[in-house]
Image (cartoon, rainbow, N blue to C red):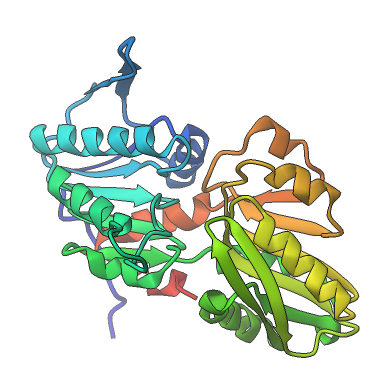
Amino acid sequence: MSAAKPARSLFTDFKVFSGTANPALTSEICDALGCPLGAAMIKRFSDGETHLQIQENVRGADVFVVQPTCTPVDRNLMELLLMIDAFKRASAERITAVLPYYGYARQDRKDQPRMPISAKLVASLLERAGASRVLALDLHAAQIQGFFDIPVDHLFALPVMIEYFQDRHNRRELIIVSPDAGGVERARAFAKRMNVPLAIIDKRRTEANVAEVMNIIGDVRGKHCLMVDDLVDTAGTLIHGVEALLEQGAKGVSACATHAVLSGPAVERISKSPLKELVVTNSIPHECHANGCKKIQTLSVAPLLARAIESIHQGGSISLLFV
């Protein structure tokens, strides 16, 4: 039986471009792929309006645009939309929006009267701008994939996190904790891969960015708890969870989250808290004050995204990268 032939790209060329949101991550991705970063000029008019130009030929190319829509969210989102539109008008054959962080993902449903579904609006904008497909990392809600009428590849950073935590704790003393009911599926996948038990924090949210921990479901006494979430914003939920777990007799608490939003008092709260360690990824660039916090450790998702980009370009499967 003859050996299977490697997949071949259907496109004349393969190019990776970056917006201004996280050029360091894109540079790492290009290094992993062994390709140069595409040339693009991005400037601002004095009133803040974005002006950009693609500075190389992309006709017939398979283009990947890496741009997390993190702070400042609206500016980075607009920049991404303009880049996609520019590639479409320059006759790129296919345009993949690579979103290490999907801004507005937390607004994925209409849970109060007269509110927008912002995550759906962002999906519509990306499609209308000309994106052919989307590569996303740890969406806040998996159903956001259904907001698109184009292919969406949804990756998870859990393999990167699991590799980090694999031998750092005694499995018999470790328990994975979901910080709320919405994150149970993510935490369960982590617990299954680590072959350790699962606990859940019952949380009641009174308003945006304000949470009150009510109850712990599961036995955490004498255990080292590892809280697993998709993002850390103001760290209020995280710190309340840490305190509740310690009150229930936990030996210690660490945490991991893919997206380090870390807005407002987050870094100060983490520094002053009994949390042992917070492990995040570089999906979002960190501010200087966050980098100075010794409790925050950063892992790179560039190799994961590079492998996904390569597979998409070659028409191969990326299912091996899923949890």
Q: Is residue 318 left or right of residue 85?
A: right
Identify the residue at image location x=69%, y=72%: 213
In percent of width and height, residue 191 lies at 65, 82
Confirm whether residue 168 shows in the render: no
In percent of width and height, residue 234 lies at 63, 50
Identify the residue at image location x=72%, y=64%: 255
Q: Is residue 80 left or right of residue 168?
A: left
Decide: is 103 above or below 291: below
Decide: is 174 above or below 280: below
Identify the residue at image location x=48%, y=66%: 156
Label tally:
0
Residue farthest to the front, as pictured: 113
Q: Quadrant of residue 148?
A: bottom left
Decide: is 243 above or below 221: above
Q: Quadrant of residue 106?
A: bottom left
Q: Is residue 58 left or right of residue 172?
A: left
Decide: is 41 above or below 90: above
Quadrant including the N terminus: bottom left
For the residue pair 155 and 236, the one nearer the viewer reads as 236
Identify the residue at image location x=24%, y=34%: 83
Confirm whether residue 20 shows in the render: yes
In percent of width and height, residue 263 lies at 60, 43
